[in-house]
Image (cartoon, rainbow, N blue to C red):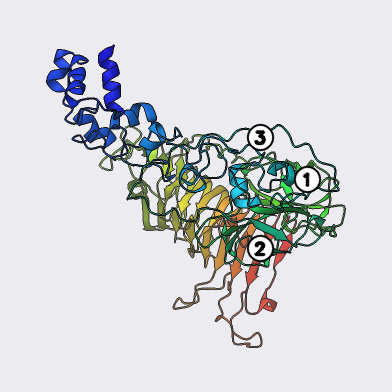
Amino acid sequence: MYARWITSACARGLRVPLLVCALAGVLLLPQSSQARTADSDRDGLANRFEKRHSHTNPRKADTDGDKLGDRYELRRAHTNPRKRDTDRDRLSDGFEVNGSKTSPRRKDTDRDGLSDGYEVKRSKTSPRRKDTDGDGLSDGYEVKQSDTSPRRADDDGDGIRDGVEVLFGLDPNSGPGDGEGQPDPDPGPPDDPAPPDDPPPPDDPDDPEDPDNLAPNTSLGGGPTGTVASGSATFSFASSEPGSGFQCRLDGGAWSSCTSPKTVSSLAEGSHTFYVRAVDTAGNADPSPAQRTWTIDFPPLPDIIPPNTSLGSGGPHGIVTTGSASFTFTSSEAGSTFQCRLDSGSYAACPSPKAYSGLGEGVHNFYVRARDAAGNLDLTPAQRTWTVDFPAPPPPPPPPPGPADVFVSASGSDSNPCTSGAPCRSLARGYAVAAAGDVVGVAAGSYPSQTIPGGSKAVVFKGTGLPKLRQLDSGASNVTFDGFDVDGAFTTALTFHNSGNNSTFKNGRIGNVIDEKGALVSGNNFTFDNVLFHDVEIHTRGVHLECLYAIVVPGLTIKNSEFRNCGVFDVFFTYGFWWLPLPPAYGGVTMENNHFGRSYNLGAPGYYTVMAAYTGNGPVFSQCGDSSAPQGYLTNWRVTGNTFELPTAYLDDCPARHQNFVWSGNTGG
């Protein structure tokens, strides 16, 4: 126990022989620790601790020379062992602990507004008592405000304490008799004897003369009070010390330099507070800034703000397979009414929810806007875009199996004789083996691209189970393809091409193409019957494609067929006016009992379902009055019993030349 007391005394810097301190430290350490712990300055802190943690001098017990050992400052006083005056009150830490008995960690121990150093060295007041003379005024107030002595309870000797005189508005410095003719206020208890003066700190040659550390007082005048209707305000202010500068702050903003008067403007409605503090020439800032709080309440303005309209999460999104839709919506302003619009229609009053039915395939847009009680209309209506895409109908049933003369199978070989027992593999081989009038039976399965070379013999290719062909290119005339699925597998390649005459493709499907035409047909008298043209998609801007491109096909017939999800156009008719010699007039076209669905163009609706452009055999842009120009524009065209989901169009330089054109029983177009 005695060894620990000696070690504590050594750490506090008391006069204990160094040898005694060293012996006490050794006694407190176990043998193993003595071997590995070194304390060169015998301050109770190991050298390694001082180097790595406290960053003090391991060879000096009192690193900062403040008369307190480093260990005592760290463990007991909780002061900085590297700073002689931790709280910067102009008194060393050792003097505050052992001399003035003040806190070395608090600049103003008694919180009277005067630093401990100022009270000890300048005002000679007690740094441990807020009111040294017991007159009811703090030492700081007497030094900075009332200009009375903080060590004398009754400066003017009139028998009334200074605090009482200040409380009743009397001058504590006016001398005896200032209370004559007035009822004497209660002087209070007799003066407490002044506490004995604390001993002044020892002279310190390193301490310069105390600077001015008394802050100025700020006074504020002018400016708004209470509730005002203006968004600007002007304030004037002054300091108790001449030559002071000022710093201003509005609400929660930062302090910034300012001059009197100070104007603030463009303020919003609500409560605002203006603060100003003086800063004297010594840099002392008023610790209690002057402030003014007021409220801005602008007169009400007419309601000119439109409401905001919100669509509920219900209703169709993206691609749906139903032709009905229902939407719910709300307004940001209570009591609003609503107007709705579908696609390119007109706005009309509507309630929430709003329902639609019987919508056709394609892209649809629903708009709704709110109108508030003041008549303001939402200028940015809420909108929902979706696409109706009915499920694709089942493929046409495969034709019943019939007798065949030549046989083709996906597992056959073109080295075979194309018999039922030894089928060949390609349609070209089957065509070569077949005689005029033969039926080439094609078994179910998947086949690579097929090419039929030129020829004129009448041959029927009859599929069983809808065989799937990657591509089909036929240059033969008088051939029939019955029951085939020409599937492009969504590649960029033409799927079906015909250049022969008097040929037919029926009871099948053509589609699944990207950035290329589904079918390209030329030659005379070609017939499509009961065919589903589908999914010819445009993915690249500027690409011209369609499900069916017919270039110079006099006598073309399209019947009982459906066009679904075609890029740009369902069907495009045009004339090869750049051919030499010019082909015959483009007449005798028949379209009956077909369904032409909406076409598309990079996410937007297509232009037309059917486009006919320059289908005669005259030069393009010839004059209608030019009798030498050949005839044939839309001559003998028959368009009956069709459904068009988008308009049709024809583009000719002289439509008056159309002859025997029949349009009847169609829907849309």
Q: How far across and how far down the image is residue 63, in percent?
A: 26, 38
Going from the N terminus, do you reach mark 1 or mark 3 first? 1
Where 216 sits versus 622, above or below? above
The crowd level at tag 1 (other Cα within 10 Å; few <14, some 14-19, many 20+) is few
**Between 165 and 26, the one nearer to me in the picture:** 165
Cα distance in 3D space between marks 2 and 3: 37 Å
What amino acid does circle 3 point to?
A: Asp
Q: How far across and how far down the image is residue 504, in percent?
A: 51, 53
Residue in the picture at 19% in, 31% down: 41
Residue in the picture at 66% in, 50% down: 146
The crowd level at tag 3 (other Cα within 10 Å; few <14, some 14-19, many 20+) is some
Whether residue 132 is visible: yes
Q: Which mark is residue 238?
A: 2
Q: How far across and how far down the image is residue 396, in percent?
A: 56, 40
Left or right placement of residue 371 versus residue 127 in this view: right
Disc 2 on helix, strand or loop?
A: strand
Q: Which mark is residue 191?
A: 3
Whether residue 588 is visible: no
What amino acid does circle 1 point to?
A: Phe
Residue in the picture at 58% in, 81% down: 630
Q: Quadrant of residue 134?
A: top right
Q: Quadrant of residue 619?
A: bottom right
Picture quarter with the C terminus? bottom right
What amino acid does circle 2 point to?
A: Ala
Q: Which mark is residue 39?
A: none
Q: Which mark is residue 168?
A: 1
